[in-house]
Amino acid sequence: MEPWWSKVLLILLGSILAIGTSFVTMWAQQHFDNQRRAETLKVAFRGEINALRSALGVDARAAVETWEQRKPIKDYKLAYPHRIYEAHAASIGDLRESVLVGHISQLYSTLDRVQDVGRRIEANTYAGDGPRDFALLLVIAFNQALILDMRLTEQTKHLVELDWSVKVSEADAADRNFHVEALKKLVKAGARP
């Protein structure tokens, strides 16, 4: 004959096991949801920052060329994609990489600075060498976008590509070389970001 408490013990152990399993399942589900959200955000930022890289490359090259020729820059109003950043600025920590979050925030802050300098130049309230400083900030933002684009491409390629090797394309090398040369010229001329 079984003691009366053995059935209670079995019920208690079964309940504890069920609660523990539920807790572990919920934790695992939340972990995988957070991981999927981080990957989705990286892919979204990869697209936006790739578009920024292209636009900044054109604008930075034009601004440096105009500065080198000592011509006035005709338009300081620049428009860059920023919907992904604005939509996720409050939850950017979901990327789960503090350095990446910092670099993305720094890029968009630099873009804000470029636009602020452009507004002050157009309003004749900028105290420095406007075209040089404007070109320098564009070159800096371009380099930030270049590095982030390469990093996010590498981190998200497993979602669309099977090849895990790191490749620097000719466009990557050309963009990086432009950045280095333009930065040297602008800094030598006394530009400050």
Image (cartoon, rainbow, N blue to C red):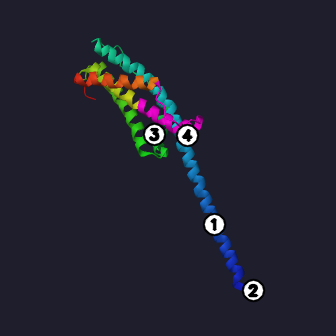
The mark that comes first in sequence, 3 or 1, is 1
- Please tell me whether residue 96 is drawn above or below residue 108 in the rendered image: below
Q: CA distance from mark 3 to mark 1?
A: 36 Å
Residue drawn at x 46%, y 32% as measured from the top left: 150
Q: Residues within 10 Å of mark 3 (few under 14, many from 20)?
A: some
Q: CA distance from mark 2 to mark 3?
A: 62 Å
Is residue 136 toward the left or the right of residue 162 in the image? left
Q: Which residue is mark 4?
A: 40
What type is the residue that disc 4 sits on? Thr
The mark that comes first in sequence, 2 or 1, is 2
Q: Specify start and end residues of the magenta stretch as a single range.
A: 146-169
The mark that comes first in sequence, 4 or 1, is 1
Q: Which residue is mark 1?
A: 19
Residue drawn at x 30%, y 25% as measured from the top left: 183
The mark that comes first in sequence, 4 or 3, is 4
What type is the residue that disc 3 sits on? Ala
- Does the magenta segment cover residue 159? yes
What type is the residue that disc 1 sits on? Ile
The answer to whether residue 119 is visible is no
**Disc number lying in front (3 or 1):** 1
Numbered disc 2: secondary structure:
loop
Q: Residues within 10 Å of mark 1 (few under 14, many from 20)?
A: few
The answer to whether residue 178 is visible is yes
**Disc number lying in front (2 or 1):** 2
> What x and y, as percent, mark residue 50?
48, 28
Q: Which residue is mark 2?
A: 2
Q: Which mark is residue 89?
A: 3
Label 4 with label 3: CB-CB less than 8 Å: no
- Does the magenta segment cover residue 47? no
Q: Quadrant of residue 174?
A: top left
Q: CA distance from mark 2 to mark 1?
A: 26 Å
Numbered disc 1: secondary structure:
helix
